[in-house]
Image: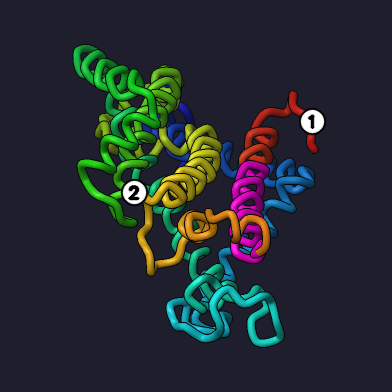
């Protein structure tokens, strides 16, 4: 029996009712869901602390030209001078201000984390959504490709690709993105396989909604939570990987400052024993940034799972 449209006094068709449910109900449910997630997140003390620290680092990197006391590549003092009123964190081995280089290095290292995650999350989400929604031989082919990518040790792949492509910021981002997308694709594929069986997706299919509209307008918004959790942990891993590669001399190259190559420049016994201002600040900021992002990821994960307790 058709439903009665109370405003017009006419009977609404079953297709109209189904379309209204497909278009409106998920939207309201998502709004309420994300509001609840936000309320749980702010109860997670470590996650909030991590968000404050990360926000502070982003603020510093965004206003680096106005905050840094000197140009990061300018020789402004004596070689390896200890901290003073002119150079709060001292100078490095060639007389550049350590604080200024640390501030500018924050821009580089955070950019690696953000851009890498954006790249591989976009690629992994699209590939995983196609595999999960289309199924069949397409799903099988994509799964085999993912298996191949994930079968190699990450460190070996990084070293080989950096050797082939060369060092530098853009190449590091490409290499890390190539390693990151398969995990996202597998995660999204599993979510799409589950969500495509839901009533609102079936209603959209019955109404003739296009596959892209269903995937990007209805399925993926409901799979956003796990993707966000993966992205936060991935950003921390990307920052740590870039720092490690730069420390080994295979990442961002001088004179561009990054946290890793600042540590690389302080490898000598003299620096380690009598010039701690060269390695303690970049080491601490790497630890702070990675911990803060991981705390944010923990907060998002715990907020999405009511069985977990807040920190």
Q: Nearer the viewer, residue 84 or 12?
A: 84
Q: Give the answer, above or below, for where 172 lies relative to 308.
A: below
Quarter-of-image position of residue 20: top left
Q: Nearer the viewer, residue 210 or 274?
A: 274
Tag of residue 117: none
Answer left or right for 286 relative to 47: left
What span is in magenta? 275-296
Question: Which residue corresponds to mark 1?
Answer: 309
Secondary structure under tag 1 reads: loop
Q: For the point 39% across and 67% down, which residue is it?
A: 256
Q: Circle 1: is it few (<14), some (14-19), or many (20+) Cα within 10 Å?
A: few
The number of callouts visible is: 2
Locate the N terminus and report the quarter of the image it occupies: top left
Q: For the point 32% across and 37% down, which residue is it?
A: 159
Tag of residue 172: 2
Q: CA distance from mark 2 to mark 1?
A: 37 Å
Answer left or right for 284 relative to 66: right
């Amino acid at each position: 029996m058709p439903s009665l449209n109370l405003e017009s006094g006419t009977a609404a068709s079953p297709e109209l009712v189904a379309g209204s449910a497909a278009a409106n109900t998920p939207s309201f449910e998502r709004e309420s869901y994300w509001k609840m997630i936000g309320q749980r997140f702010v109860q997670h003390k470590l996650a909030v602390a991590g968000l404050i620290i990360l926000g502070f680092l982003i603020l510093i990197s965004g206003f680096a030209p106005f905050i840094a006391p000197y140009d990061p590549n300018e020789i402004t003092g004596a070689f390896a001078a200890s901290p003073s009123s002119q150079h709060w964190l001292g100078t490095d081995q060639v007389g550049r201000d350590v604080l200024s280089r640390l501030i500018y290095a924050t821009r580089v290292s955070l950019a690696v984390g953000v851009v890498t995650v954006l790249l591989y999350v976009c690629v992994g989400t699209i590939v995983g959504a196609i595999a999960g929604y289309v199924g069949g031989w397409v799903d099988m082919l994509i799964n085999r490709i993912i298996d191949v990518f994930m079968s190699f040790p990450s460190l070996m792949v990084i070293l080989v690709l950096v050797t082939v492509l060369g060092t530098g910021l853009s190449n590091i981002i490409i290499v890390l993105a190539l390693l990151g997308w398969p995990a996202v694709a597998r995660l999204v594929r599993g979510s799409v396989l589950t969500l495509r069986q839901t009533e609102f997706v079936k209603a959209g299919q019955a109404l003739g909604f296009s596959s892209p509209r269903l995937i990007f307008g209805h399925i993926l918004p409901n799979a956003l939570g796990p993707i966000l959790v993966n992205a936060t942990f991935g950003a921390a891993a990307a920052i740590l990987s870039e720092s490690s590669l730069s420390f080994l001399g295979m990442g961002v190259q001088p004179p561009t400052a990054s946290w890793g190559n600042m540590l690389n420049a302080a490898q000598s016994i003299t620096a380690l024993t009598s010039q701690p201002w060269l390695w303690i600040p970049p080491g601490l900021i790497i630890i702070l940034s990675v911990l803060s992002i991981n705390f944010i990821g923990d907060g998002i994960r715990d907020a999405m799972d009511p069985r977990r307790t807040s920190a």
